[in-house]
Amino acid sequence: MKDIENKQNDLAFDPDIIQAPLPEVDVPQTPPESLMKLMAPPATKHSCLACKSVYNYTIQRWDQMPLSVLGLPRSEREARMMQRLVMDVRQCANCGHVFHTDFDYDNIPYRTGSNLVYNDGSSWRQYHDDLVDEWVADFNLRGKRIVEIGCGEGMFLERLAQHDNHCIGFEPGPDADRAKARGIEAYAEYFQGSRLFDLKADALICRHVIEHLANPLDFLEDISIACCEADLSPLFFAEVPLIEKAMEQHRINDFLYEHVSNFTKNSFRTLFERAGFEVLDIRARFHDEVVTIVAKPRPNPLQRAIRRRVASFNRSISDQIKNVQDTLQGWKRDGQRVALWGGTGKAAALINMIGITKELAPIVIDSDARKAGGFVPGTGQEIHTPDYLETHPIDHILICTNWRARDIEREIREDCGLDCDLYVYLNQGLQKLTTECAL
Ligand SMILES: [Zn+2]
């Protein structure tokens, strides 16, 4: 997938033979200039693809747009019968990203359709040569392992391979075979960040791909997280069309269904920074019609710490459940009666997560008299007020909410006058409540 925007004029169909009804265009009512500065955009259900803000302004909505890059019709009938798609084009109020909201990646046959790439323009060819020379010189791309995501026919990698680089391409469409024919190690598949564990790339290239993605932030975050896990810090070179000139000139033909994202320099930078990259260089090129970025994953020691903590927490849970169950079963076996203090909220969560059934602990007390007569969600024990214990003696009370445990302890000892053992759920099991307990 690359270099596709230059071919648009060659894909235009003869208007005389296209009889499809013209789309009805709702021309938005423009408020007076004096009022516009008072208007904030309403929150929408559509998040910006670059920064996730839900505040955006409508540029225009087209209801009947065909694909225009993938799947060139080979007959008039086929052209007229093409699926019509909605393009609801908006600009993010936060970062300036231009995107459309009703996009469905599955409407585009990337697996079977070849991009109609126009690579023969001499200035475009020269641009590629110059870009490779610049990146090789400025970032020492010699003798490196370079992975291109969406390598198309492999023409860009072919140039990089001339500098003793080991070049690997990912291209889900039929162009992968053409890349292989150029001697590129090409895979006919979508790239996943996890591939970096094996590939150990020194550099990633991704040109004219990101504007096609339904979730570009997820795509880049997948890579930055994988880099962190694999302890890699590859340079990431990316290029997309730049929408700023089209916006200034009020050009509408830059909006293509296939390009769900239209980047400004700011939104391109925002996307990478939000995805965990440090931006080293960003610049408009080719008559300001494209923008390139060079970035590298930001070190993120917090991510590894979180992974370790989560794994430890997760591994402990089954042991915790067994510990609490064993204690409660032991009390039941020994004929010791227990009451649970707390029947909703965190107490109900504990009762359900541990599986403290009515058979195991039938008595549930709550300090809040409003809950009396209700039942524990999920397990069904009836909830009673504390005076229930006057007629139903118990040996232990398990206080199910630690943050209120000291108040409940005082209530049990002073208000109810009970001297039974008190327990809390602490340190992955049940622990007798003492003054030393660090709740
Ligand atoms: Zn945004």
Image (spheres, helix red, strand yellow):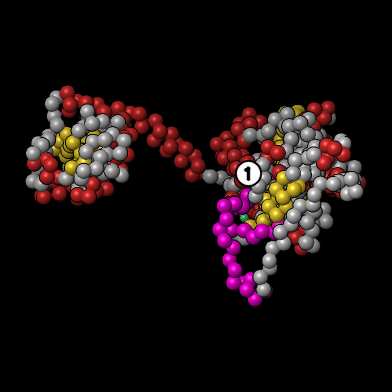
Of helix, strand and loop, which one carries label 1? Answer: loop
Residue 344 on the magenta span: no
Amino acid at the residue labelled 1: Asn
> Which residue is at 11% across, 40% downward?
389
Quadrant in which the N terminus is drawn:
top right
Image coords of residue 363 (percent x, y): 18, 36
Q: Along the horizontal axis of the image, is 310 left or right of 177?
A: left
Q: Which residue is mark 1?
A: 215
Image coords of residue 385 (percent x, y): 16, 45
> Which residue is at 87% across, 36% downward?
75
Q: Which residues are magenta?
A: 33-60
Question: Residue 96: in sight, yes or no?
Answer: no
Tell which of 211 and 201 is nearer to you.
Answer: 211
Q: Quadrant of residue 139?
A: top right
Relative height, residue 110 to residue 84 (above, below): above
For the stretch drawn in magenta, what is the main secondary structure?
A: loop
> Which residue is at 46% across, 41% downward?
306
Tell which of 30 and 18 is nearer to you.
Answer: 18
